[in-house]
Amino acid sequence: MNYTDNNIETSYKKILQSYLDTGSEQVLYEAQQFTRTLLEHQTSPEELVSLHRSIMDQLYPDLPEDIQASFDFLLEAMMGYGMAYREHQILRDRQQELEAEIDVAAKMQQTLLPREELSVEGLDVGVVSVPAKKMSGDYYHYVTDQFGGVGLSISDIIGKGVPAALCMSMIKYAMDSLPEQQLNPSALLESLNRVVEQNVDDSMFVTMMYGYYDSKSHEFTYSGAGHEPGFFYCAQKDSFEDLSAKGLVLGVSRKATYREYVKQLSVGDFIVFLTDGVTECRVGDEFFEREEIVTMLRKSIHLSAQEIVENVYRELSKLQDFSLRDDLTLIILRRNV
């Protein structure tokens, strides 16, 4: 049934009288459908109560006074409810608009991450990066140069949501503008540090670890800016050790300098970069220990680098009931030849 502004009262009266006469469930269904028309005409709850009372007065002019008084009571209650309901609708609409904007921002954020897999002869690389919510504070980046070398970075923006995403975009474009093939890790971090210090609010900081793999010498040179230590796996010794690099987080001091460290990679050796979403995984009230991450890595050590990172992610996710409490990024770079 189609309704217009002119026959809302007539239509409602007809439905109400039909139900009072028959008690039919079909009429109740028709009443439910009629509420859509009321919403389309932005009829408030108190207006509906007033309409109902007016029609009842027409149908039953001799209603007892206490019944009439109950309609007055209901009308007053609905006036307060109507105001709260309209405020709720406004807040809901704003929330939906915000969610839509965040969805767009999250999709744009994904475009900041490398789109193509890193394919370098002699290297096996695996990457997994999963946000705890829609927006991520983790960022990773890799690039190859004309010499066959690989620049690899991982960072964690201290902060969440849209501000972290905006900071991530600045880091990405700053790195794109730097001639990475001409910069060693310490110089690159010092350049980025100046960019962050000049452009990021004092309440936000960026941790980062950057490394360069020389495919000729098989040396991995790296520097860190307050970032979570990774791991180095030595195949000959079948042992893991922490991959630490001391350095001030980006953005604190314009004059910060960064020390370089070097690891020689033999066949089967690999580097692990990660964010604290991996090492600070919480199971109940307890944090996961780094030794337990090593145990997870060992379980899949015979698999490809991508399979290793995916297996570790699945185990960590399962331990947290498939609800990450922090953004998680894990990268493995392994020498195969």
Image (cartoon, rainbow, N blue to C red):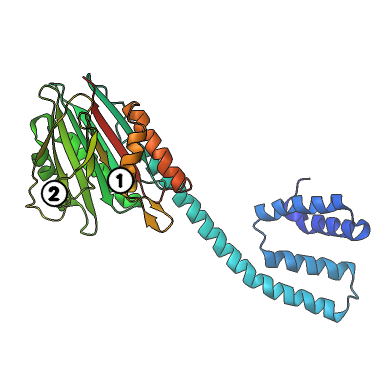
| Nearer to us: label 1 or label 2 | 1
Element type at mark 2 = loop
- Is 92 situated above or below 50? above
Residue 317 image position (x, y, % from top left): 43, 43
Q: Is residue 262 left or right of residue 233?
A: left
Q: Which mark is residue 239?
A: none
Q: In which quadrant is the C terminus drawn? A: top left
Amino acid residing under circle 2: Lys
CA–CA distance between discs 1 and 2?
21 Å
Task: Please identify the quarter of the rendering in which residue 202 is found.
Answer: bottom left
Residue 137 appears in the figure: no
Residue shown at 33%/36% (left/top)? 297
Residue shown at 35%/46% (left/top)? 327
Residue shown at 76%/56% (left/top)? 8
Q: Is residue 227 left or right of residue 58?
A: left
Do the residues under discs 1 and 2 have CB atoms within 8 angstroms?
A: no
Query: Which residue lies under the disc numbered 1?
Result: 291
Q: In which quadrant is the N terminus drawn? A: top right
Element type at mark 1 = helix
In the picture as drawn, the residue positioned furthest to the front comes out as 237
Query: Which residue lies under the disc numbered 2?
Result: 246
